[in-house]
Image (tube, helix red, strand yellow):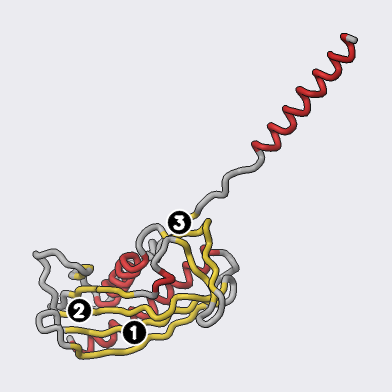
Amino acid sequence: MNNYLLIFGCFFITACATLGLGGCGNKVPQISYYSLMAADLAPSTAVPAKGMALLVGPISLPDILKNSQIVTGRTGERYQRSDNHRWSGEVDRDFARSLGEYLSRRLGTEQISLYPMSQSFTPTHQVVCDILTMDGVLGQEARLVVRWSLLDPATKTVSVTRRSFCRQQPADNSYDAWVAAQRDNIGCVSEEIAVALRAKNP
């Protein structure tokens, strides 16, 4: 009888240990965070735009982008939100910072501030953006459509309003590649804005 109890006890302990190890194998999914800021922008070699002080923002965006989850898919079709791939901050502020850095490089100036600006900053130009689309499919396409305007900061008079349509093919089907492609899209938008600013400030 004692032998049976001993065998049963050993079996019970082994089963519990096996279940315990199996439970430990269920890892909590890791969340990855991304930014639209390009970390490897080279120093500017552009001829400085003399006397220019640029205010970037405000930036408006669709409701679907107003959350931390990265959204992929195509306009008019189904979107997918990823619980495990998220933006590191508010998309509108992150976009403004990225656009400001690209414009700083293309215009050769450090006189750039984000909306709302500090009282010590006096801009000569302001760019406001309405992000119409920031979508695409992993491994296939990253698309960005932005309507932007140049304003006189003092009078709020709009001098230029245009639409930029930029598209990149991600290097692979990862979120890293898709976000990198969107950074390139912001660079594309900044190039068009910089051309318009230089035309106003030769």
Left or right: residue 174 versus residue 133 is right
Who's the residue at 53% across and 79% down the image?
Answer: 74
On the image, the x and y values in percent for residue 15 come to 77, 28
Real-space Cα distance between discs 2 and 3?
A: 30 Å
Residue nearest the viewer, comparing 163 with 63: 63
Residue 174 visible in rendering: yes
Who's the residue at 28% across and 89% down the image?
Answer: 161
Mark 3 element type: strand
Q: Badge 1 local density, few (<14 within 10 Å), some, or many (20+)?
A: some
Q: Which residue is mark 2?
A: 126
Q: Which residue is mark 3?
A: 33
Q: Which residue is mark 1?
A: 147
**In the picture, residue 128 is in which quadrant?**
bottom left
For marks 1 and 2, the one nearer the N-term is 2
Q: Amino acid at mark 1?
A: Arg
On the image, the x and y values in percent for residue 140 come to 58, 76
Q: Amino acid at mark 2?
A: Gln
Disc 3 and disc 1 in contact, CB within 8 angstroms: no
For marks 2 and 3, the one nearer the N-term is 3
Who's the residue at 36% across and 74% down the image?
Answer: 61
Q: Amino acid at mark 3?
A: Tyr
